[in-house]
Amino acid sequence: MKPMPTEAEVAALQAKYGLSYHVNYAMHAQQMVGLEGKRVLEVGGSLPREFALQDLGASRWIALEHREYWDEVLSTGNVTGTPPEMGAATGQAARADDYQVQFGSIEKLPDNLAGAFDVVFSIAAFEHIARLPEALEQMHRALVPGGKLFSLFAPIWSSHSGHHMPDITDKAGTVWTVNNSPVPPWGHLLYRPMELYDLLRQRMDAETARELVYFVYGSPHINRLFLEDYVDIVSRSSFTVRIMAPQWAYPVPSHLQAQLAAMLPKRSDFSSCGLLLVLERTR
């Protein structure tokens, strides 16, 4: 197994491929489940060919992207994340040592990809999968016995920034991003849609406010699952859980914790921003 790269080596890879967190996450997957020499199915992303096959050393890399997600996000006029540059129809055959980006849904895994992979690799994607129970069963089906799933993702709906708003430009030319979000921490949980709209109208025009309210409460491209939902869904899946660990705890002020607990009595964790999963197909 390749050793963990130094900070300088990570920075060099990020600069070379135009990536950010992707490099660190991939290196963690390398250490935790192994990617070198493996046949890998990437779900909800498409790492660059050279990075996947040479730097990570995978023998085969098939990336499965949901194109409709990118169509909606890019409609804001801003590039958020790393959209795929090319893709093929889901289910096209690929050589055993090939790299390919396919557009489609993991919930409808083509038969030719069943039992074809040693690793399912997914980063910053599970919060976007609406039919997560079915998606997990299809990921299980994609693996050979003994195969592993690695997933690391955030922000989840129950966290302070779980609204997952895209970058958006208002009529005055202000670009709103996660770094200057007009949605207050946990605002998507504390406010009803039109209450949030009234709050946003104090900072931007009506059209942009309406669009943001749509992305927060209506877009089909985030699943709005709470941490407890993920734990329950994963625990009921066909996988054997090796690691299921909440990530990036963000302190909740006591008055907000009390308010959220009163509003959502079956929920308790509003701190964890993400989740790390290492699952195994043992049957």
Image: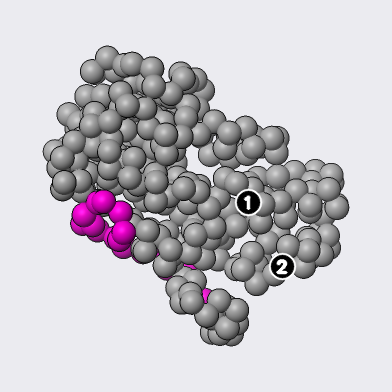
> Label 1's element?
loop
Residue type, numbered disc 1: Met
* Secondary structure of the residue carrying numbered label 2: loop
Query: Around disc 2, counting alpha carbons within 10 Å, would you say few (fewer than 14), some (14 to 19), or many (20 or more)?
Result: few
Q: Quadrant of the N terminus?
A: top left
Point out residue 258 in the picture as x, y percentages from the top left corner: 56, 85
What is the three-letter code of the residue carrying label 2?
Answer: Arg
Image-based side of 276 in relation to 187, left or right: left
Give how far across and how far down residue 110 sits, in percent: 36, 27
Q: Quadrant of residue 249?
A: bottom left
- Left or right: where does residue 267 sit relative to residue 30? right
Q: Which residues are magenta?
A: 235-253
Residue drawn where x is 28% and y is 30% of the image = 114
Residue drawn at x 70%, y 45% as measured from the top left: 168
Query: Is residue 58 in view from this perspective?
Result: no
Circle 1 sits on which residue?
165
Left or right: where 13 falls relative to 177: left
